[in-house]
Image (cartoon, helix red, strand yellow):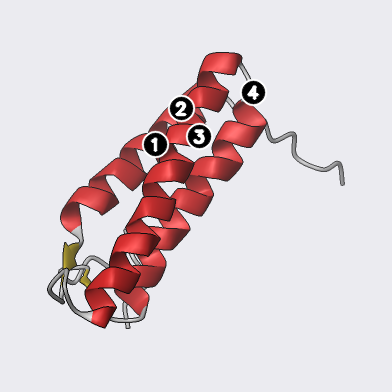
């Protein structure tokens, strides 16, 4: 049986960019920015935002494989913040891995 041909397309990358943007907007902090948890969360969201920015830059360069990788890293940072209880995913078990 032949292996399926899987291709990273601009449509696929754009879909994941939109998903990660929606996840970043939906998840809300559970701690104040001044708390230790809030500071850790700020670092995590800085990483998520940096990877999202990188993904967009890779798209502009025509490098869809690296763009796809970067946007998945970005989403993982947001998802992790929900999973470990720094953010509320509001019960969305399709967008997040809930605790």
SS for callout 2: helix
Residue 64 image point, x, y percent: 61, 26
Figure check: 63 above or below 6: above
For the residues labelled 1 and 3, the Cα–Cα distance comes to 11 Å
Q: Are marks 1 and 3 in contact (CB under 8 Å)?
A: no
N-term-proximal mark, 4 vs 1: 1
For the residues labelled 4 and 1, the Cα–Cα distance comes to 14 Å
| Residue indicated by mark 1 | 17
Q: Residue at x 16, y 73 (%)?
A: 34
| Residue indicated by mark 3 | 54
Q: Quadrant of residue 7?
A: top right
For the residues labelled 4 and 3, the Cα–Cα distance comes to 11 Å
Q: Are marks 4 and 3 in contact (CB under 8 Å)?
A: no
N-term-proximal mark, 1 vs 3: 1
For the residues labelled 2 and 4, the Cα–Cα distance comes to 10 Å
| Residue indicated by mark 4 | 63
Q: Are marks 3 and 2 in contact (CB under 8 Å)?
A: yes
Q: Nearer the viewer, residue 54 or 33?
A: 33
The residue mark sitting in front, 4 or 3, is 3
Q: Are marks 2 and 1 in contact (CB under 8 Å)?
A: yes
């Amino acid at each position: 049986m032949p292996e399926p041909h899987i291709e990273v397309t601009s449509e696929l990358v754009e879909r994941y960019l939109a998903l990660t943007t929606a996840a970043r907007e939906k998840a809300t902090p559970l701690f104040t920015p001044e708390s230790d948890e809030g500071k850790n969360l700020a670092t995590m969201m800085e990483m998520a935002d940096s990877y999202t920015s990188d993904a967009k830059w890779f798209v502009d360069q025509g490098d869809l494989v690296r763009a796809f990788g970067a946007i998945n890293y970005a989403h993982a940072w947001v998802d992790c913040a929900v999973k470990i209880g720094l953010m509320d995913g509001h019960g969305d078990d399709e967008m997040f891995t809930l605790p």
